[in-house]
Image (cartoon, coloured by chain):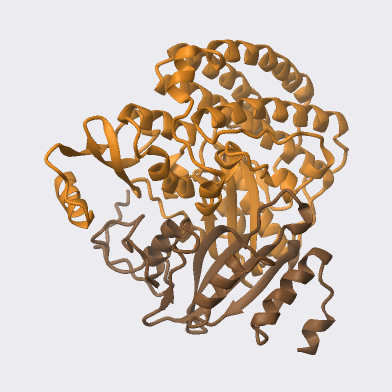
Chain colours: A brown, B orange
Amino acid sequence: MSEHEATTWPEHLQPVADALRERFPQLSIELKPDNWLEVKVDADQSPEFFRYIKEYPGLAFDYLLDVTAVDYINEGKLQVVYHLARLGTDAKKRGKLVVKIDLPRDNPRVRSVVDIWPTANFHEREVYDMFGVVFEGHPDLRRILMREDWVGHPLRKDYVDQRPKRTRVTR
Amino acid sequence: MAETAVTSEVKQDTTTPAEHELFVNMGPQHPSTHGVLRLLLRVDGERVLSLKPDIGYLHRCFEKIAERRSVQMVIPYCDRTDYLAAITSEWAYVMAAEKLMGVEVPERAEYIRVIVGEMQRIASHLLWFGTFALDLGAVTAFLYAFRERESLFDIFQKLTGARMLYNYLRVGGVRNDLYEGFEEDILRFLDLLEERLIEYNKLLTGNRIFESRTKGVGVITKEQAIAYGASGPVLRGCGVPQDLRKTDPYSVYDRFEFNIPVGEHGDVYSRYVVRMHEFYESIRIIRQAIKTIPGGPWLGDVPRRMKLVGDVYTRVESPRGEVGVYLVGDGSDQPYRCHYRSPCFVHLQLLEPMGVGHLIADMVAIIGSIDIVMGEVDR
């Protein structure tokens, strides 16, 4: 843990890091460019973690910007990435948080956050559509951008286009 | 196709539709949806009981394509996501690439970006003003707005060579410098626009018919807007002073003086007022930037072999809200993953809380007020 303590945090982010470490002492917190805090969480810990950062008064990350995923095929994992922020008129109370959850590539499952931030609904549907990540407890997990009867999840790195090849016309 | 989809929705709906209830397909080819948005409405007479947006008709695999192109080759594809605000889409992407490569952007380039970015905001808001008024039946405003938009596009064409999809920003700066006489052109346009804005306001802002169509329609609370991740004028219309140019400044926005217009009631009219004020703020920013723009190069030193390493999320305030690009690099010159966070994609979820209980005709006003661009929603 000593390496974390050596990090000099910007003043307004120190309470955030403290509050996170108070509840989750094993958490690795990193400072990224533009004052983003990056946190890696286990999938089974995630429901507790998200509830905590939303509801604990010292954290209160009320604004979910984005949910997406990355397929790290060489490391054999799918990573779901959440971007969160706090809104407020006081500049010192602002903070930005990246949460990353590693999932196995076969049968990736993680708890949905729609009940915490309703905006996650479409984002999670998109991640399900493109990567096949199943969000447990999602009210309406269907494909959103691709057709309903589409086979496969296009943004996975090992995705193969199933459509018949078109012959190229050359002149 | 439409029929089977309707029945599947009926099955999902927990409440069985009563005798007098009806399912109505609005779209995908409905003129007021600004593209190919399909709304599935459950109505009682004219009143909307519930609605579900159905999207994906314009999906062009932007994120997949970006994984197969080198860094600079993705920029024109960014234009085509939000085609009414191409500069801001490019900007978010280019900023992400610069951060991953550690490229410094010359000061002059940042100023040029601010100027074209604000010009873009004006152009986009002009189109919104015209189509929004047209949706509500005011045809004249549409013609007025397009007249001004065309003369702004003339300047864009002189500067970038294109009228809508510019491909102007580059990793490390912009493609070419401002042309000789740009200053006079843009200042003349701004003066003209200020005069015309008075006309616009006379046309709509105090209009009794317009006000009764928009006031108290599509109301959302501050808490709802935040919970649903709203951004841009939709969030500011609820009274939250959130504008990335001020709250999380990027580029050189912290050097200019401008206000964040905020609405009061979170209804269609508040969002209208916020956007009308933003015209003036953009004009202010462009005038300041023109006055203080430094000399120097407009394209920084960019390594010939580009390498993207690490991951970064950049956010830009587009005319519609927060555009974010999540870019991951694996050491090659192609993005390993490029995710585009679209504000309208998020705002579509707000249609249900906004629209339920209103008439079908009000849905048209509500859709117009969130300024939707389907190219950006479906990517």
Classify residue A92 by image quadrant: bottom right
Q: Is residue B284 visible?
A: yes
* Residue sitting nearer the eye, A61 or B320: A61
Number of labelled discs? 0
x, y percentage for residue B224? Answer: 51, 48
The residue sitting at the left extreme is B19
Q: Nearer the viewer, residue B141 or B176?
A: B141
Which residue is at a point 45% across and 59% down the rendered structure image?
Answer: A123
Q: Nearer the viewer, residue B166 or A31?
A: A31
| Quadrant the N terminus of chain A occupies | bottom right
- Can residue B77 be seen here? The reply is no
- Res A104 → quadrant: bottom left
User: Is A5 located above or below residue B192 in the figure?
Assistant: below
Task: Reply above or below: B70 against B174.
Answer: below
Q: Residue at x 38, y 66 (%)?
A: A128
Q: Is residue A128 left or right of residue B179?
A: left
Residue B51 picture quarter = top left
Residue B214: x %, y % from top left: 46, 25
As drawn, the residue found furthest toward the front would be A57
Residue B156 rendering spot, x and y as whole percentages: 64, 28
Q: Residue at x 58, y 36 (%)?
A: B237
Name the foreground residue: B358 vs B337.
Answer: B358
Residue under the point 81% across and 44% down: B254
Left or right: B285 in relation to B125 = right
Image x and y of residue A27, in percent: 65, 83
Q: Is residue B130 left or right of residue B301?
A: left
